[in-house]
Amino acid sequence: MKRSPCSSTHRRWAAACLVLLCMGEMAGAHAWSLTLTAGARRLFLHVGNGTLSGASGTLNGAVGTGGIVNTVQASLTTAQLIGGAPVAMTSDSTQSVSLYGDGNITCPSPDSQVMIGAGYRRNSGATSAMLTVVSPLNLTNLSTGDTIPITQISWTASAPGSGAPNVIPGGAFTGGSQTLATVPGNTYVENCHSFAYANSAVRAQGTYTGTVTYTLSSP
């Protein structure tokens, strides 16, 4: 599909992080799959705010890293904690425009979405790259040592206007390494992830944090 990317140029990889934050007063998916112009091997990955990948569909931007580590968070009231219903998490990302390079508005509401994009350009070598995420077992309150299982955090995926489902699908963190997507050669995939906190138990008051790391790699 035509529309639409931190770059890295022998195992090749690119990585990006996202901070997860939960606070309390007391204790159907779509994505863009886009074509890249073939060229020397290069990986591109961004999670939230990032740096333009280059001219549209080329991955010819400067090699290196850019952008910030974004945070998603849920600040729960006492009533929400007691009620036990899932709570949508907000984001400090401001990235709404695709980093593929064509100016498309992929994530129209970045305050509740995190844009994730991964591209693999090649003219030789491995035919695909792997997008993975590694998460800790728990979110931790650094003041008290209390924890919340990371499995309480899940996400859904969307990309308005796209007809390519499940390129980077929704899911939940597992407290380890998990594969999110296989990116074929000369392809860029991108969508928006909206995170939620399951809120399945009343937790002790405090701020709980954890960092997840996304990696795009190719042998």
Image (spheres, rainbow, N blue to C red):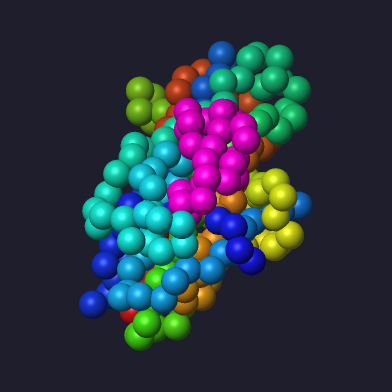
Residue at (56, 14) in percent of width and height = 25
Q: Position of residue 189 (x, y in %)?
A: 54, 61
Question: Which quadrant of the view contains residue 13?
Answer: bottom left
Residue at (40, 71) in percent of width and height = 121
Is residue 129 on the magenta stretch? no
Residue at (75, 22) in percent of width and height = 83
User: Is residue 176 in sight in this rendering?
Assistant: no
Q: Position of residue 198 (x, y in %)?
A: 66, 37
Is residue 100 on the magenta stretch? yes
Relative to 165, say whether 50 is above or below: above
Relative to 124, say whether 19 is above or below: above
Q: Is residue 100 left or right of residue 30?
A: left
Q: Magenta residues?
A: 89-112
Relative to 170, say whether 199 is above or below: above
Of 169 and 124, the residue lying toward us: 124
Of 181 and 76, the residue lying toward us: 181
Question: Which quadrant of the view contains residue 194?
Answer: top right
Residue at (63, 26) in percent of width and height = 202
What is the quadrant of the N terminus in the image? bottom right
User: Is residue 51 in sight in this rendering?
Assistant: yes
Type of secondary structure dominating the magenta stretch: loop
Count of number-bearing discs: 0
Relative to 32, say whether 208 is above or below: above
Q: Is residue 95 left or right of residue 29?
A: left
Q: Position of residue 219 (x, y in %)?
A: 34, 79
